[in-house]
Image (cartoon, coloured by chain):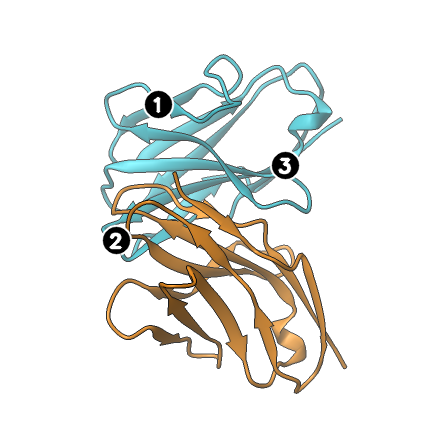
Amino acid sequence: AQSVTQLDSQVPVFEEAPVELRCNYSSSVSVYLFWYVQYPNQGLQLLLKYLSGSTLVKSINGFEAEFNKSQTSFHLRKPSVHISDTAEYFCAVRKSGNTPLVFGKGTRLSVIA
Amino acid sequence: SAVISQKPSRDICQRGTSLTIQCQVDSQVTMMFWYRQQPGQSLTLIATANQGSEATYESGFVIDKFPISRPNLTFSTLTVSNMSPEDSSIYLCSVAQGVTEAFFGQGTRLTVV
């Protein structure tokens, strides 16, 4: 079975500062990795994903995540955050197509002006 | 991509009653998934629903409490039966298309009083 650990439940950070949200996973098989974002009172949105190929993946709004197989990690980073990045961020894995996602407990990112 | 319509978006229900949540997808999908997100928590998989067969429930969830129907490849319902305040959560429908990503409905915010 797969599992996901998000090491930080809450991360406060000042506007324009860098941020890293940590995610580690456990699986006996190869997995696909995802970051989802949930803005206050909204649904889940896919932020970025790693399926194969380059281990560094980027989103359109400046976030990036790097797949590290040896450390079984998929940490999310942004060099300079905005107030609008305040949200809950969920790391998730799945082992193959047509299987459900397994989510971490989430990290609440709070950007402070 | 897939567009998922979930109804109702929110409801306030009396304890002891039941609520049926509908999930409509704009394309045919093999599997649909139902998740629960309790206040301030991550998403927990309730069950996987295949068309034409019984749903597969995760540990801690039973068919008598959460009966699921899957009459065709674009529609599913989840019923929350004999509700108690502990059932107050957001319930989300999800579908997977290949290995790329999972899509989510906007969720049903249920409050049991």
Badge 3 sits on which subunit? B
The structure residue drawn at horizontal position 52% and vertical position 75%, both measured from the top left corner, is A77
Badge 1 sits on which subunit? B
Identify the residue under disc 3: B89
Amino acid bearing label 1: Ala
Q: Nearer the viewer, residue A19 or B91?
A: A19
Q: Is mark 1 on a helix, strand or loop?
A: loop
Which shade is chain A? Answer: orange
Q: Position of residue A29 (x, y in %)?
A: 29, 47
3D distance between C-alphas at marks 1 and 2? 21 Å
Q: Horizontally, is A57 left or right of B62 in the view? A: left
Q: Horizontally, is B2 left or right of B104 in the view? A: left
Looking at the image, residue B28 lies above or below residue A7: above
Badge 2 sits on which subunit? B
Q: Nearer the viewer, residue B85 or A23?
A: A23
| Image quarter (top left, top right, bottom left or bottom right) of the N terminus of chain B | bottom left
Tags 3 and 2 on a common chain: yes
Q: Residues within 10 Å of mark 1 (few under 14, many from 20)?
A: many
Earlier-in-chain disc, 3 versus 2 = 3
3D distance between C-alphas at marks 3 and 2? 28 Å
3D distance between C-alphas at marks 1 and 3? 21 Å
Which shade is chain B? Answer: cyan
Q: Nearer the viewer, residue A102 or A55?
A: A55
Residue B99 marker: 2
Q: What element carries label 3?
A: strand
Q: Are marks 1 and 3 in contact (CB under 8 Å)?
A: no
Amino acid bearing label 2: Val
Looking at the image, residue A26 lies above or below residue B100: above
Identify the residue under disc 1: B55
Residue A91 marker: none
Q: Where is residue B83 in the image (x, y as percent from the top left)?
A: 64, 20
